[in-house]
Amino acid sequence: MTVSSNRPNRLIKEKSPYLLQHAYNPVDWHAWNPEAFEKARAENKPIFLSIGYSTCHWCHVMEKESFEDTEVAELMNEAFVSIKVDREERPDIDHVYMTVSQMMTGSGGWPLTIVMTPDKKPFFAATYVPKGSRFGRTGMMELIPRIREAWTKRHKEVLDSAENMTTALQSMEKEKPGGLLDAGVLDRAYRELRQRFDKTYGGVSGAPKFPTPHNFFFMLRYWRRADVQEALNMVEKTLQEIRWGGIFDQIGFGFHRYSTDKEWLVPHFEKMLYDQAMLALAYLETYQATGNTVYSDTAEEIFTYVLRDLRSPEGGFYSAEDADSEGVEGKFYVWTEQELREILPHDQAELVVRAFHVEKSGNFREEASGKSLGANIFYTGKSLADIASEMNVPPEELKSKIDSARSRLFDARERRIHPHKDDKVLTDWNGLMIAALARGAQALGKKSYSDAAGGALEFILKKLRKPDGRLLHRYRDGEASIAAHLDDYAFLVWGLIETYEATFDARFLKTALELNNDMIHHFWDERRGGLYFTSDDAENLIVRKKEVYDGALPSGNAVAMLNLLRLSRFTGDADLEDRAFKLQRAFSEQIRQFPSGYTQFLSAVDFSLGSSHEVIIAGSLGAKEMLEALRSRFSPNQVLMFRPAGEESAGIDAVAAFAKNYDPVNGKATAYVCSGRSCKDPTTEIRDLLALLGKKNP
């Protein structure tokens, strides 16, 4: 029988929205803490570890089927000490046991189900488990008695299995450092991506499809380096298709997490902060590369969503919005034709039906059977210009009409029951959003974006930085907690660098250097090079992992490598560059095996191979025009500094001592350009500046 307990379990004392969702389960849940493991040892019980997150659809399904069920809960409480973990709060735990799942089963995902010894050594792994066995999946009612029997009757065999699994996991974490990577690895990565590219719909062929923005970053840099037009075409094709598809929220903006089909039509409806940040960056870079305002418009739409729906009153950014509302996936986002006709005037309803492919029976179909669910996901499938041409109306007129209808529908949708919002603030994800907003301020000339980035930084540095300078990972409901991981440092440093280049406030660059130093001190592997995911004083897990493969998020090592290279150019500190090369060598042999799995890392390699540029603008008169000319172009391997005239230069001079040597010529803003460890003659002319940089103009 499925019920929720009237009495809360231990999770009621937690801050995580995900753990709180399970606080009234009849399962005797523990949070991950020493007491839970001591209880398991004292009672000689295995640990049932369940990892998920608050906006995970299948986590909700498993909760409703099993964790709210008194029969399942009774079996779990007898057989296990059960622990719930929020993967977004504890990515260190998630990374370890997701690797276990992939090793044991060949796949992974959430909810992640692990059964392990009281010493944290795993011997069983699965993802979603139904209550009863079906479709080839063993159910909880059958699985729990089997595990309990194995634990009691074949105990040594289970312990040996767990020990062997742990040994295998630990052996994976012994990198073999190699030589530096060259341009040939970039060529191979591009060929691998091109081979898997879906020429019809963009992205990687097959379903489900994830946008994977770090692939776009790499291909844009490859296009710029190798002058291969197809690389740019692949980026543009994908960015256009996802903007026209159902994976984009055509009414409220922002991107859903992924598409369940190859056409980008039917999304998994949850919205994640990190997806918004990474995709905004991809659209901004493609706008700079092409000059096509379709991409800048999309970036602004993403920012509209984030600043409206994910920004906290204190300035930080919330983590995610759920796929489900009222227990139904996508219900908040889909429409029946009848609803549209009741909300909109006749002419607007007709326009929306045609432009967004609304069907009377509904285009939202069940994934397995293809059966219509009676509602519609909005998508255009083509550009606004193409739709305007088909309708024989000017594009500006069509846009005005669609915007008017969209506004009415948005207001109507706001009156619906909203999906759950995960309102915890994570340092790493905020770092990505800060970077995106600051880049938006640079590329689009909008101070409101740099203000938002600066406000989020102020919040993070005030609430999630301890008096000793160390970062914390999570803030919610007035409490900052959980030791920061590598991604927290690397992503926040990225955001600080971008915000410096957007505002030229040297405090951001100074803080970036401080946090980067802390990161090296506490995460660096002195023996083999590279950065561990956890600090030297973090909780001991069964393995201390290093992450370099790009998943939904880019790897912290990849981001850190590019940060090190950029900071070395800002400061003239050769030790930072040397550290970046050691980091590259630590993973080079691994990356050579399958380069396209490490595209964020390869973007850093692209920077290291050159040519890269350091540009210092000295003086104020005419500086605005120079900066606008630089920021309008796609120049990923450039660092940009500004040294104002007079006493205002003290900030940047304190951070980068060499900047004192740069003064304006004849009172006019002057550009100093260095590349390949040599500097060019200064210039006061924008045309000459761009020629020195060898810019590709859109």
Image (cartoon, rainbow, N blue to C red):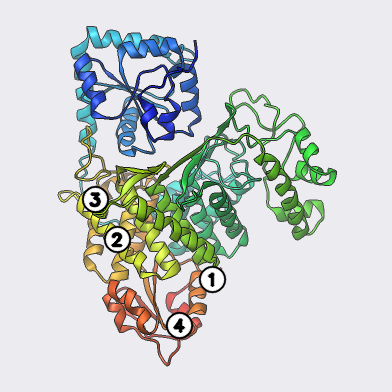
- N-terminal of the pair, mark 4 or mark 1, is 4
How packed mark 3 is, by other alpha carbons closer than 10 Å (few <14, some 14-19, many 20 or more), is many
Give the number of the mark in front: 4 or 3.
Answer: 4
Dots 4, 3 in contact, CB < 8 A: no
Residue type at mark 2?
Answer: Leu
Q: Which residue is mark 2?
A: 564
Furthest-bottom residue in this view: 666
- 533 and 549: which one is in front? 533
Q: Which residue is mark 4?
A: 620
Residue 660: percent from left, percent from top: 30, 81
- Distance, label 4 to label 1, CA atoms, is 25 Å
Task: Looking at the picture, tell me which residue is in the foreground, 469 or 205.
Answer: 469
What residue did someone put label 1 on? Answer: 697
Q: Determine which quarter of the picture holds residue 7.
A: top left
Mark 1 or mark 3: whose residue is earlier in sequence? 3
Q: Is residue 328 visible?
A: yes
